[in-house]
Amino acid sequence: MMKMLAVFIFVLFYSIVARAENIIGVEFNDSSAKENTYSRDYEFKIEGKFSEKFTLKHGQCGYSKASRQDDCLRDRGRIERIGDWKRGNEHWYKFSFYVDETWPTELEYKTVIIQSKVKGATDPTWVLQLEHGNLVLSFNQIKQHCKIMDYNDIANRWVNVTLYTNLADKHTKWFKNEKKKAQIWIDGTPKKAFCGYSESGLVPDKLKTKNFKKYGQSIRYGIYHSYVSRDLYRLNPNITLPGWKDTHSDVGSSIESMTNDPWSIDWEILYPTKNIWWDDMQHSTAKNPWDMNLSEIDNIHSYE
């Protein structure tokens, strides 16, 4: 009996310690991109035993378990981790990321670093991406985007982000503006972000299906770049490419790029390497779980 109790305590302790490094929980690495794309950094961190480092180089791609498609043949590359699914309408997220001076700000097309998705939907509910190194917050389902920070204010330091989102039609009580459905804080300070406003919530009714009610949404974080052939062609303008149209039938749209198979081409100038570190990842549906100052919010925002 005592032996069984000891084993139970050990397993419980190990589980708590393991999840303390990443409170969102993680299902798997999304993509079969190999060659040290993901690692734990025990020296460079802000809390716990380690941070998570993601690296993506030219040609590193693979089969995406989430989209069930081959990124290598879809003008993409990614290394992401996916958090647990959480049900509910009001979600809070807390995390820190770090990019250094090697981040390729010369690229024209954006890089997604973290996003939240409803199960079965192509477009994310919200996404943070780097455009020329600048931090941009987008709510793709309602087609709203806003710049949050310049690259010079991001590079070479840990950036702490807290984000609140309301997926429902119901008004968030502590927002005076009934259309306001989201708020972002950087290093504990609320930021002006003129996006995330909707009369019907951040998730359209057509996506509030059985999957949404059963699973809710989850976040995925790391590095995800798409339509890389655009930038590769800009770096190598003398190459003739066939062109490609990426069709998204579920949302009735398409995006054009230079080729669906960029990694098989012998480019003279390669796609630049990207590195990012993540730490203190948390996702909660509790009410204001990190005691953010909500009284400041309506003093800095207006939107009609």
Image: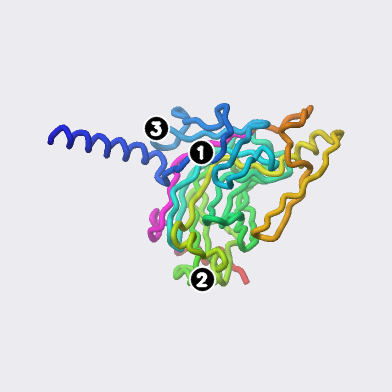
The residue that label 3 is drawn on is 49
Query: Identity of the amino acid at label 2?
Result: Asp
Can residue 152 be seen from the camera position used here? no
211 relative to 113 in the view: left or right: left
User: Which callout, 3 or 2, points at the residue further toward the start of the chain?
Assistant: 3
Q: Is residue 231 left or right of residue 153?
A: right
Which residue carries the number 1 mark? 29
Q: Nearer the viewer, residue 150 or 179?
A: 179
Q: Disc 2 designates what residue?
A: 169
- Is label 1 in a helix, a strand or a loop? strand
Question: Considering only order in the chain, which callout, 3 or 1, is on the residue closer to the N terminus?
Answer: 1
Tell me the magenta residue range: 274-294
Q: Residue at x 75, y 40 (%)?
A: 229
The image's mark for residue 20 is none
- Mark 3, other Cα within 10 Å: few <14 / some 14–19 / many ≥20: some
At 52% from the left and 55% from the top, the residue drawn is 119
- Looking at the image, what colour scheme do you see? rainbow
Callout 3: SS = loop
Q: CA distance from mark 3 to mark 2?
A: 40 Å
Vertical order, 189 against 63 (above or below): below
| Near-viewer residue (167 or 66) | 66
**x, y percentage for residue 141?**
61, 61
